[in-house]
Image (tube, helix red, strand yellow):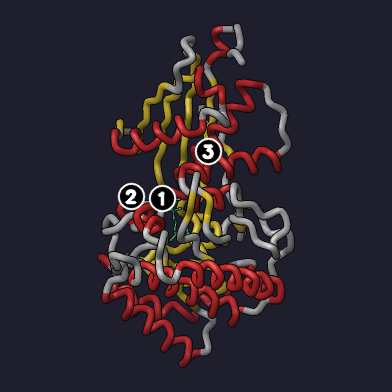
Amino acid sequence: MTFSQNADANVFFSCWKSPSNIALIKYWGKSGNQIPANASMSITLKEAYTLTRIKAGLIRNGGGPEVEFRFEGEINEAFGGRIESFLKSVVSYLPFLKEARLEIESGNNFPHSAGIASSASAMSALALCLCSLEKEITGLETGMEAFLRKASFIARIGSGSACRSVYGGIPVWGSHKAVEGSDNEYAVPLSFDLHPVFSEIRDTILIVDPGQKKVSSSVGHNLMKGHAYADARYKQAESNLTAMLVALKQGDWDTFSLITENEALSLHAMMMTSRPGYLLMHPNSLIIIEKVIEFRKQSGSAICFTLDAGPNVHLLYPTGETEKVRPLIDELKVFCHKGTAIDDTMGSGPEKLNCR
Ligand code: DP6
């Protein structure tokens, strides 16, 4: 492959906005090159996203990619280093990178310290930009389905959970017998329409602690190797996903809620029972969880909670219950860092932007 002979045409741009996601069925444990130990499923969010823009030019020595990375306007060496090693690891799938010099600019619309997982939105935005550039530069003809599949595959190599953010709604990543076309190397959208009960899920994220995680997800995934409960956990995730699919089809919010909370607590149970064990929940996370359960009992609300690999609590409820749960959320803000709660909803996935 060579770039166009026309000098002016040797500069290419690509820009994507890609959202974060919150897992319902958790990915925890992996092997090889980002192969998940179990299939996972998540809600793609709408408001929390990363915007990434790449300007690509030609280098003739074939020793690329050369990279300059700016995060929110500033050269960022720490992030830049991670991006560079990611790019090197995907050169065999995106050979045009060997002849490319990339100026990458990226930024989140949520504060870096908000405690929202940014690797999913960042890596999916980057993968989408790279796949768009490949199409433009090499003239590769692919339909939308194949394009998104490749972007999901590339995003997975950057960060497992990122491969799900390529799709809106509730995608699945990982091979699972009940999901046709599911694969360990990329995510797929659900092949059926969600029951209307789930068409407008809200996620209010209670920021208990916006700080850096004490133990990174990579370390956590690694601790699943040889974990005493690993096999049972992978079986549990598999059957939870099967039951979740039925609930999503049938509009069974009670089962949705039961499985979502079971997954959140099981994830943290895996952390606590690792060797060495560790705790990412904060005392305030526990207070919030207990108050949510109590509120649900008293009010008959559908609200339920889930957790990422951190202390912040995600509250999931149907949009129709926004007014009903408001007093609870106001009460729970007392247990949050500076009273911070971020409102989000299920979204329709990434968007390609025209931003030269
Ligand atoms: C708890 O996707 O951050 O959020 O593949 O090492 O980048 P890497 O891990 P990452 O792990 C996410 C774990 C989780 C659950 C989930 O999103 O499924």
Q: Residue at x 37, y 60 (%)?
A: 223
Q: Residue at x 48, y 29 (%)?
A: 54
Residue farthest to the bottom? 298
Q: Are marks 1 and 2 in contact (CB under 8 Å)?
A: yes
Pick the front one: 339 or 314? 314
Residue matched to label 2: 112
Q: In the rendered structure, which amino acid carries the disc numbered 3? A: Ala
Q: In the rendered structure, which amino acid carries the disc numbered 1? A: Ser
* Nearer mark to the viewer, of 3 and 2: 3
Pick the front one: 264 or 22? 264
Residue matched to label 1: 118
Q: How far across and down, in percent of the image, does residue 131 sit? A: 58, 33
Residue 101, quarter of the rendered image? top left
Secondary structure, mark 2, is helix
Q: In the rendered structure, which amino acid carries the disc numbered 2? A: His
Q: Are marks 1 and 3 in contact (CB under 8 Å)?
A: no
Evaluate whether residue 334 shows in this view. no
Evaluate whether residue 153 shows in this view. yes
Residue matched to label 3: 127
The 10 Å Cα crowd at callout 3, few under 14, some 14 to 19, many 20 or more, is many
Secondary structure, mark 1, is loop
Quote the CA–CA distance across marks 1 and 3. Answer: 14 Å
**Ligand 1 positioned in quadrant:** bottom left
Q: How far across and down, in percent of the image, does residue 256 sit? A: 58, 76
Horizontally, is 14 left or right of 106 in the view? right
Q: Residue at x 64, y 43 (%)?
A: 149
Quote the CA–CA distance across marks 1 and 2. Answer: 8 Å
Q: Residue at x 64, y 52 (%)?
A: 183
Residue 219, quarter of the rendered image? bottom left
